[in-house]
Amino acid sequence: MYTANRKRLQKLTDCTSKASKHFNRYEIECLIKLFYTLLEETAEKQSSIGIDRNAFRNFLHTTFGMTDDMIMDRVFRAFDKDNDGFVNVTEWISGLCIFLRGNLEERTKYCFEVYDLNGDGFISREEMFHMLKNSLLKQPSEEDPDEGIKDLVDITLKKMDHDHDGKLSFADYETSVKEEALLLEAFGPCLPDTKSHLEFEAQVFKDPHDL
Amino acid sequence: MGVALTRAAQWTTAGFGTGTLELTPLNEAILNDIIKFVESFTAKYPQEAEFVFKEPLQWKTTLKPSEFESGYIVSGTTVQSEENSKDGQPLLLLSGTDIKVSSFGQLSRLLRLARDKKLKEAQACLEANRDPVVKILGAGYGTVEGEEDLSTIRFLDKMKKDDDHENNIKMNISLLLQQLDMHLLNSSLKHISLEIRLNPSAIKNDVDLLKRFSGEGEQTVLESIDYTSDFEFANGCRAPPWRQMHGEICYLIVKPHDCDSICLTCSTAGIFVNGGIDNEAEEIDYERHSEIYKDLVTFLREKSAKFSENMSKQQHSFFGDKKKGKKKSTSVTEKEEVCTLSKPSLALEKSPSEKRRTLKKLEPVLKWTCPVTQEKKNSAKESQDEKSTPSITEKPKSTSPPTLAGKPQSLSRCKSSVKIEDLVSESSSESEEDEEQPDHRQEGQTDLPSEYWQIQKLVKYLKGGNQTATVIALCSMRDFNLTLETCQLAIRDVGGLEVLINLLDTDEVKCKIGSLKILKEISHNSQIRRAIVDLGGLPIMVKILDSPDKNLKCLAAETIANVANFRRARRTVRQHGGIKKLVELLDYAQSKTDPMHHHCLYETKDVEVARCGALALWSCSKSHINKEAIRKAGGIPLLARLLKSSHQNMLIPVVGTLQECASEERYRAAIKAERIIENLVKNLSSENEVLQEHCAMAIYQCAEDKETRDLVRQHGGLKPLATLLNNTDNKERLAAVTGAIWKCAICKENVTKFREYKAIETLVGLLTDQPEEVLVNVVGALGECCQEHENRVIIRKCGGIQPLVNLLVGTNQALLVNVTKAVGACAAEPENMMIIDRLDGVRLLWSLLKNPHPDVKASAAWALCPCIENAKDAGEMVRSFVGGLELVVNLLKSENKEVLASVCAAITNIAKDQENLAVITDHGVVPLLSKLANTNNDKLRWHLAEAISRCCMWGRNRIAFGEHKAVAPLVRYLKSKDTNVHRATAQALYQLSEDANNCITMHENGAVRLLLDMVGSPDEVLQEAAAGCISNIRRLALATEKAKYS
């Protein structure tokens, strides 16, 4: 049984390591192990092919301190390339590859995917509103609590909508991010912050010999 | 306990003779401690209790013989203890009121007998025996103040020698007493630290407030409260200076409603009733007649029931006011402690936030003066006035809405007041680029630009948004033109700075980056810089330097570089350990990239980190304590290493820092040691003009010593410097380059090189149409070059003398010093002198003797010497200056040694002409010169002796010098180490020895012996003068002998 597992792991590592350029073999092995640990911990049915939405959200929350449900759902979507409701091992590796180590270009693409809620290739005014609606503290003095959000959306559009069509295309988004890297996560945190990122890598990739 | 008694206990301040211990709480505590110690002594150390004191403690007691119980033999007025010492003396002896006690056992028994009079007895005992330890153990154990107490060591020595039982006990007692001493000191320290010390401004505040609530009628708290004196000293005290020594601040006469008027003393220790005013003598009886109260209000509450009653009625309004007052007074207090003598109002002038607060509270009269034009002042006034009525501008500040939980709102405004304290403490030697100007806020809402409202809205989102909204708002804010003052001030005026600085204190890297990016931009504005410092932004930025994120480090360092443009900011950076951290940034360029960060999203290069660090250090290095801090943090080797880099924008701040720091002696040494000059020279040939400028500037600063000047030459630095002279468009660079040339030209070999490179001709060409900074250096360089004959000729041939003489009419002091020097050097050449004379240069030099600055005076006088020496008809020329000779003679009254020396030298030259010598004699040159004779300055001695020697040539001046007692000090000059002094003195003595009385004085002062030594000198002039002088003395002696026998 052990050798079988071992072999399977070897094979998996081999084929995924070709796909992901930011991890080395050892790191991939570690991540695959983590994948199976997560799978065992959370899924009741051993037969399932991957981590389901809830388990993944749980993972994001506990490991990277993400809180926004909507964003976490979108991150899951971004990971779950084949849209089957599960993140399988290949998706896991390639997703984390960008999530943890992606270069600016890859990350821009990923973030845009996350923010483009309906996947139509544009971040519309409504989508922005949706994502930003919790970003301002409600002030009792204000008559229309949404007014601030609408205003914020306007500000964002003014800043990022380069072709002035009232929505953000990928090109708009990319240009803005290139101008100002801070705008990469313009509509909510969907990448790990430095601290939890370092902690995660340190924990997962720690050398077994160090123990 | 000796130390505690002398230092901590408060002896009565007034009165003479034996001091008495005042009954202050502190003293009471000390006494109680001593009593407890003595009482328990018998029980704890029975052996030591029997030890007989070296001398009995003796004092006047209040105890009656009848109070003594068993163990004592009472007979009439005398009481004797049953216990006796070895030699039969009773250990306690009371006769009348005098009591003598000679053991701890008896002391503790006595105290037990005394019961409630314990305190009094202990007090009386200690008052009568100021150093009880001496009496107990002997004179060797006295309290040594300030020095190390060696008694214990001495004791140990003794113990080693003989193993005496008694010594053992003595040792124990001594140790016990020392322990007690420590204990007393510690507890009194606690006591002292609890006491609030009053200060003039706090009292003034209290009195002012009470005055407002005083007057006729039932509702007021007091009938009247007044100072006894209207005169207020600069430190805020009203007490006469000799009472200020006792910590007294002022005296008050208070008339409460329900009792007589009271005369109070306000001292730093507190408030107490004094003896009142003696109407006849108009003197205050300064003695204390009550307990000490911690402040005026507490005292009055105690004394007057009506006061406390009415106070409680007015409680609300009074304390509402009082609190504000307190705030102000505490800030003043802090400053006051540092320098009690400066005006209390200073603190208010310095901190703008403070200023604003007090303004609102007090009245709309603005009294501070500011170094701005009238126009600006008016506008500031207007806007300030506007603010005293609540204006729109102020609104956002006061109604700051609650923010997201993640952002700590810890910034307290009082931070700014703390800084006022050290503001005064720092030396003022540093240059202040950023004149602290008064705020000028944007006026009225009508003409506010549209940006103002947009920025206000963004700040609202900054305050009330989560991370995401904050980042959007920050990015959007950066779209405004932040280099415009309107936008910069708008951010401040809507309270944006507070929020931006608060953001720096969060954990959100992105918010920090965004905020710093904005702060970096707007901190180019001096008002913003000040506001950032006032809001406590610098410590947070310094903390950010520790962050692992390089981008953050860079931004923080760059912002610090901008903010640290004025002294207070630089000091704040240093005080929060910023210098060390910045120096650590310099190390980045070398350290290997951390593997953990290679994938970091917001990657910045290590070089960039080092560059920003250097940039910040550059700003900080303008303070001189900071320079020292940079050196101590090991900055110099790092800067030296960075200097080898090829990044130009890195080199500029590095060289800038070095150039700034090179004003310090230690830096120059380190710069030599680190072989920095080589690289500076290399970068002189860089493409970048700014870099060239700073390198030249650094060389200018460093080339203070010969070694460095040689290094510049050896590394081939003179050629590029000479080449750079030809490009005159960039004035800053030209100033730096000419400066470097000036300093290098102090070295002869360098001058030869410069001549080779035809630099002297170029320099002469720069004498016209250049800004003063350039001129100062050009003239300085020419002055150095002129020390050589060849160069003087070159200058004449290039027509350099005319422009030089023309510059003599300037006003720039540094320039005048250099010009006079250069003209003086040129005048060494008779042909040059002719030109100078024709251009009326001597008259111009002469009139510079009236210049208020001593350096200019001295330099002008030095320059006159060669002029007079080399001019044709010098005597006639000098006489032609109306009032000129009187002016010169009067300069002998100067305080400045250099001026005196130079004037003496000029007089020496003037006196070569007999007629002129007659004139200056009439102006009283002899007594003035004689008065200077008692000096230790060798340069002055030299020229003074020469002048005296010259002046002897007229009339009865020789005799006059003797009468004015110039001879004896002159003899002492012979003991100097300077041969110039010897030569001049011997000549002067030779001249003076023509007069018999002077010979006697010389002989009496032992001149012969000293002169005999001089005769053996290799210097012929000195030899001859010394011999001549001796022969004169000898001749006189022979003549007297002859007279005796004939």
Image: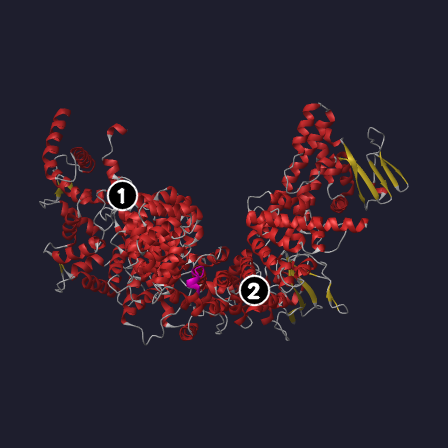
Query: Would you say residue B566 sits in the magenta stretch?
Result: no
Residue receiving disc 2: B913
Q: Which residue is mark 1?
A: A196
Residue lying furthest bottom: B446
- What element does badge 2 sit on? loop
Q: Residue at x 57, y 51 (%)?
A: B938
Mark 2 Cα-neighbour bin, 10 Å: few <14, some 14–19, many ≥20:
some
**Region in magenta:** B826-833
Quarter of the image where the N terminus of chain B is located: top right
Chain holding disc 2: B
> Residue B771 in the image: x percent, y percent?
36, 65
Q: How is the image coloured?
A: secondary structure
**For residue B376, above or below residue B115:** below
Residue B634 is tagged as none
Compared across the picture, whether B519 is left or right of B859 comes to left
Q: Label 2 near label 1: C-beta < 8 Å?
A: no
**Type of the residue with mark 2:** Asp
Helix, strand or loop under label 1: helix
